[in-house]
Amino acid sequence: MEFLAKIFAMAIAAIFVQNFVLMRFLGLCPYIGVSKKLDSALGMGMAVIFVMTMASTFTWLIQTYLLVPLKIEFLQTIAFILTIASLVQLVEMIIQKTAPALYKALGVFLPLITTNCAVLGVAILNINEEYTFIFAILNGLFAGLGFTLVLILMAGIRERLERAELPRTMRGMPIAMIVAGCMALAFLGFSGLKF
Amino acid sequence: MSIILYSIATLGTLGVIYGLGLAFASKKFHVDIDPKIEQINEILPGVNCGACGYPGCSAYAEAIVKHSAEINKCAPGGDEVIANIAKIMGMEATSADKKIAVIHCQSGGTNNTFFRYKYHGIPTCKAAVLVSSGPNLCNYGCVFQNDCIAACQFDAIHLDENGMRIVDKNNCTGCGACVIACPRNLIELVSIKKRVHVLCTSHDKGAVSRKVCGNKTACIACSLCVKKCPVEAIEMQDNVAVIIYDKCINCGQCTDVCPTSAIFDPLKEVRAKKKAEAKAKAEAINKQPEEQKTTEILEDTK
């Protein structure tokens, strides 16, 4: 029971309280770039969830069984980037062969997130927070979910803004920036939550 | 010193392992892609309009190669694209009948339309028609929120000086995006060869539709055109005349009898001019001998 409670607390923390985009400000590039349409936002979100979970798993293993025993933790960033990049490449190949429909849905997003800072961020945070193996994987999953949630919310708002009567100077990127700011403020409200 | 060695060894081995793994995977999970698909995909216009019935250009390219779909379905591409696809596939080009959009409402624009109220809501037609049957008095006509213009990727629908929507024949590719966008179903794809159209879709009784149409061009279902048509190509369907394009021969006789000019014929002026010329010629021929006679008589008298 305590285990489940811990997982729940971690989910709330990763999705809302320490949201990757709006609280940690990681992965802002796709947050602005891929949030124009709901469909592509969903595709990107799914790809990020997938890659973050996979990356958490493998980077934790590399850190624990390779870097720590050899006392070369300072190579963390390079080793993680290398791992994540080749992992994404491998996953892309496997998906293309086994699930063409999923490959088409994820499309260009898979290679795009190879070096996304949010993915590297979740890998390094897992190590810094000294999570166990299971929790590291779950943290990756929840971080991806939080990212997807924010991306979809943003896409929904921006799709509606297309129809809104805005002053000419505010159309497009300026209003998107203002919305992003408002969303960050709203998510700041979660920061009082503690478990 | 040992740390440097460890670092080099670790990263080196990691790199080699990943590299070998990826090389092995690329062999094992190799997917054969027909180069024809790529070639056809490059030829297609790439606007993903969906006129072919497939979700996007690349899906259509794949369908042509893998499932031998018909090659003449790309409306925006036209004959040129069909010919190029035929070249790649080693098939004979079968030209498709080019279709363009026809808007079946000559609203006369915002200036000539009677309104129930002034609409200030969400600026789309789909929203406007929901507010007590739309802002204009005619329950079937254009509501002027430009969904069709927004849907058109080819800049083929313009406003005339009165604010009426006009389809640009040269730009329209017949993709059908506006047909789907119009919530009042005013737009239809018709072969570019057919020139005469009934530009009204009002199913109201004649007296009502005449009253609510600000442009005075409503079809009042008088059936004169049905009687006049030499090839029986016009039918009365639920209080509006409908041209059956398969039978229509572009003679334009219906335009002459229509009391409200609901039937539009772009060739009307050309026809009138030709008629006048023919008449003048006939008269000239009739006159000529008389003139000759008179001159002969005059010469005789001399």
Image (cartoon, coloured by chain):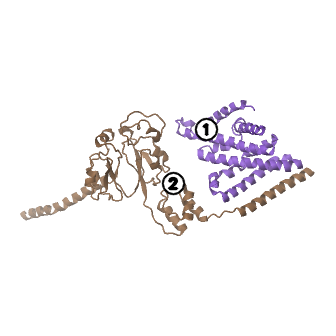
Chain ID, mark 2? B
Measured as percent of width and height from the top left, residue B266 is found at: 34, 52
Residue sitting at the far front: A1
- Whole-Å distance between the Cαs marked 1 and 2? 29 Å
In the image, A110: left or right of B168?
A: right
Q: Which residue is mark 1?
A: A176
The percent coordinates of residue A13 (x first, y second) are 73, 36
Chain letter matching colour purple: A
Residue B50 got which mark?
2
Residue B79's tag is: none
**Residue B183 in the image: x percent, y percent?**
44, 44
* Mark 1 burial class by Cα count in 10 Å: few <14, some 14-19, many 20+: many
Choose between A139 and B22: the one closer to the eye: A139
Residue for point 40% across, 47% down: B186
Q: Is residue A54 left or right of residue A156?
A: right
Chain that is coloured brown in the picture? B
Looking at the rendered structure, whether the residues under marks 1 and 2 are on a common chain is answered as: no
Q: Amino acid at mark 2?
A: Gly
Residue A80 seen in the figure: no
On-image quarter of the C terminus of chain B: bottom left
Asked whether the residues under the numbered discs 1 and 2 touch, taking CB atoms below 8 Å apart as contact, a structural biologist would say: no
Amino acid type shown at disc 1: Ala
